[in-house]
Amino acid sequence: TEWLRDEAGNLDNPFYLYIGLGLPHPKFATSQHYLDMIPEEAVDLPPVDASLHPSLAYQRCNKNWLHGFSDETVRLVRRIYFAMIAEVDAMVRTVIAELDHLGLRDNTYVIFSSDHGEQAMEHRQFYKMSPYEASTHIPLIITGPNVRQNHDEQALVSLVDLYPTFMDISNTPHPDGLDGYSLMPELTGGSPVRPDWVLSEFFGTSVNTGVFMLRQDDWKYIAYAGTDPQLFNLKEDPHE
């Protein structure tokens, strides 16, 4: 907000402000102010997996959940996580209020998103590094000039779509072979040209093999190199 007051209003050219909040994120810590916003009785316990996939079993061991945690601990961790989300909401509200105060809202795009989700004890895990929804299905909220208000877009999109979206916002031509598809058709009510599927893959920390996730409509297919795949219908089985 200090930068917006001191710099943005005095610039002759458009500005780009990136704010990395660092929350919600391990370590799980919050203040009593935000914890009081989350009633303990409102925090659910995630369901237990119907079967234990070998890759999931390895991750639990790697993430130090070999013996599990009590229901009390699981509920506390989730309550603190939700409190951190409330704190992020307050931070975003502060920035939005400053844009309003400076008269910049009408010609400024605001994009809220995240690089990953958090298991928050779903599937008896914490951290990210997973093809499950808690890790891969992230928030994406956009407002700005000509953006449809109160529209809940159901198309499957990906973080790689943000770059061509920024290019369209700034009237910058797209280079050939660019990954991703601009979100402007969805934002303005135009006709999208994107495929009806998204792909995610992971080969890093805590997994014992390469993981590929393909999402199309309500279906999610997860391929694990060297072991059995998984197939979920997220409408019928939202907890996977």
Image (tube, rainbow, N blue to C red):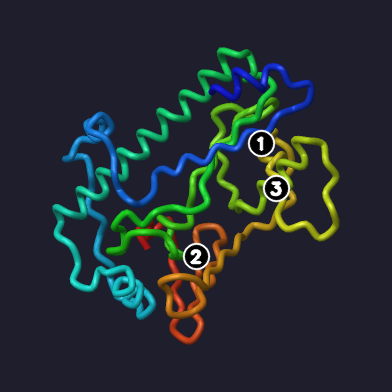
Which residue was labeled with disc 2? 220
Q: Nearer the viewer, mark 2 or mark 3?
A: 3
Residue 74 lies in quadrant: bottom left
Residue 220 screen position, x and y as percent: 49, 65
Extreme residue toward the bottom, this view:
226
Residue 230 screen position, x and y as percent: 44, 74
- Separation of disc 1 and disc 3 at Cα? 15 Å
Q: Is residue 66 left or right of residue 143?
A: left
- Decide which of 80, 13 is in the foreground and name it: 13
Mark 1: secondary structure: helix
Which residue was labeled with disc 1? 187
Give the mark nearest the N terminus, 1 or 3: 3
Contact check, label 1 and label 2, Cβ < 8 Å = no
Give the mark nearest the N terminus, 1 or 2: 1
Which residue was labeled with disc 3? 163
Give the mark nearest the N terminus, 2 or 3: 3
Contact check, label 2 and label 3, Cβ < 8 Å = no
Q: Mark 3 belongs to which amino acid?
A: Tyr
Q: Mark 1 belongs to which amino acid?
A: Leu
Q: Residue at x 52, y 41 (%)?
A: 20
Q: Is residue 93 left or right of residue 66?
A: right
